[in-house]
Amino acid sequence: MVTDRSERIHVFTRALTGHAAGSDATEENTTRPMQAKIQVKGMNFYYGSSRALESIDIDFPEHRITAIIGPSGCGKSTLLRTLNRMSDLVPNTRIEGHIWLDGEDLTAPSIDVVDVRRRVGMVFQRPNPFPKSIYDNVVFGPRLLGITRRGELDALVEKSLRGAALWDEVKDKLHESGLALSGGQQQRLCIARAIAVEPEVILMDEPASALDPIATFKIEELMRNLRQSYTIIIVTHNMQQAARVSDYTAFMSWQAFAGFSYDAQTAENQAASVKLPKTQAGRIIEFGPTKDIFTNPVEKETEDYITGRFG
Amino acid sequence: MTALTSPLRLRGVNYRRRKLTNAVMLTLTGVATLLAVFPLIWIIAYVAMEGGRFLSVDFFTQLPTPVGVPGGGVANAIVGSAIVVGLACAIAIPLSLVAAFYVSDHPDAPLGVAVRFGTDVLSGVPSIVMGIIAYTVIVLTQKHFSALAGGFALAIIMTPIVLRTTEEMLRLVPRNLREGALALGAPEWKTAVQVLLPAALNGVVTGIMLGIARVAGEAAPMIFTAFGNPFFSTDPNQPIATLPHTIYIYAISPYKDWHDKAWTTALVLIAFVLGLNVLARGLTAWRTRQLSGR
């Protein structure tokens, strides 16, 4: 394990110095000095007494798309939700270790979770527009920040909807219900809603898994554009999607933990947490540039998963 | 077509019996449905027939007349009922909504369990007991009957109904809607007021309407609280007439013309409650259409 880890760090260092940053990296991206936006160090996460995440060390690079892949129950969503403290919503949870957002420790007791969530936005698996008009969906966040001037809000709506590549489709019906849109449009509305508060990081929890291929394509295209302005972290079950869209990929191991599973939660079962049989916590097996992870993984487990020989 | 031969052969054996069973069951369910709706139609039709004969504009605008004097109306009771029910709403609705948010958010917390158990017990308590409570708490302290005491008694009856319906409706709001708001940095209370409540509004309105319909027809608690008043009053601190109490007074009287007025008052009360229900359903249906964009 020790050698593996040093190698992994080596892989990542290579990435940081810009050597293997992936062939699809734009010129602007390769010239900009790369630094970690979110640094996770020695993080453990518990649901009650069972450990869901174990010794998570990962640096999410700024203005890049990082994909987290791995089988159901490995703690991908749990990791994602610790990054904006949405993990607090499940009772009896505990975080150990550190998560630094630009050097500010998100796990510190003094931190204001409301503030964290304004800086780290989130897009969910199933589109969840509020039962309000398209306009009111987008200005929900800005209004929370105290923006009330009509002109300012109008400008924000146009900017955010353009940013989410939805403006042209909805500009004539801004005051119609957000629920009247198609699934793919709803998800882009949720992205517009998230970027309306100009967060620094956007977390996406399987944002396209409930969408058809065309809508998925639009979301992926949108993500590549958003990368210019935001740091994006995406959890996905779709390895092609990770390969297509991300600059970096983290592979997490399958060993499920006994306790809560967001995967089970999202599968209509909103009521109770689901007990899973395995007891080992989720770990990051390998992290590096997407190209390396998919073409030349260091770990056998990664290779098995990617090539479908998993389990 | 050959694939069908097997089921077709079976058809000869069971087909007749299945068809017969189907016809019998369909008839039974149809009859049961008719039986269930019949009392409603019958009551409305009977009250409309008995009470409709004396219905006039005066009935809504005039005060009661003494026995034997023709004409007159129940204007005081109509206004009185509106005031007492309004007072009940003013107390019960805010209280129920706030409590429902807490209970739906903390269903397993000791207080949440206690509130749910408490409201279930409360909704089973006979309404006359609420009247006695209001009598003890307000009438005996103030040393006189009042509309306020009536509103208080009705509020106790209304609270469990509105609280439980609202709580159920809030729990039906998809979890990811709440998460969506929180992920935008919304504090819990703003999430509740701006996202959860609008999403559950149809159900909440239905709950409030059920509550109003229930308490608007309560006569028993009024005997100890609002007490009735043959004169026109809008003072919440004075005794006041209400429709159900007026029906009671007229109905137990030995006079034929008061009996007729009891029927007419009953018709007004039923029309009021039904009208409110239809209005609420219309509003929620309209709102649903607006939201779904169709």
Image (spheres, coloured by chain):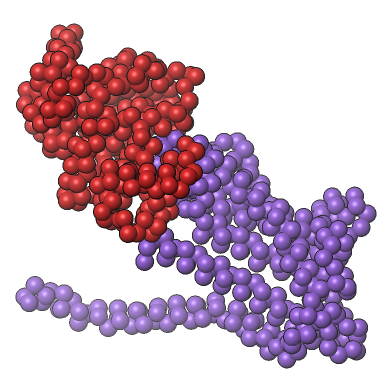
Chain colours: A red, B purple
Residue A265 visible? The answer is no
* Residue B193 in sight here: yes
In the rendered image, which quarter contains the N terminus of chain B?
Answer: bottom left
Give me the residue at 58% from left, 41% from top: B102
Front residue of A242/B171: it is A242
Asked whether A267 or B147 is in front, the reply is B147
Residue B129, quarter of picture: bottom right
Residue at left 40%, top 41%?
B180
Q: Is residue A163 above or below residue A90?
A: below
Observer-nearest of A23 and B213:
A23
Pick the residue in front: B126 or A187.
A187
The quadrant in which residue A142 appears is: top left
Residue at x-position 48% and y-position 81%: B31
Residue A202's place in the image compared with A279, above or below, is below
Q: Residue furthest right?
A: B143
Counting labels gives: 0
Q: Is residue A257 left or right of residue B195?
A: left
Q: Quadrant of the C terminus of chain B?
A: bottom left
* Picture coordinates of residue B247, whole percent (x, y): 79, 76
Residue A208 horizontal side relative to residue B68, left or right: left
Q: Position of residue B240 (x, y in %)?
A: 84, 66
Q: Is residue B242 above or below residue B101?
A: below
Measuring from the top left, give residue B206's x and y in whole percent: 56, 62
Q: Could you tell me residue B191's position as x and y percent? A: 49, 42
Q: Residue at x 30, y 18 (%)?
A: A39
Residue B72 found in image quarter: bottom right
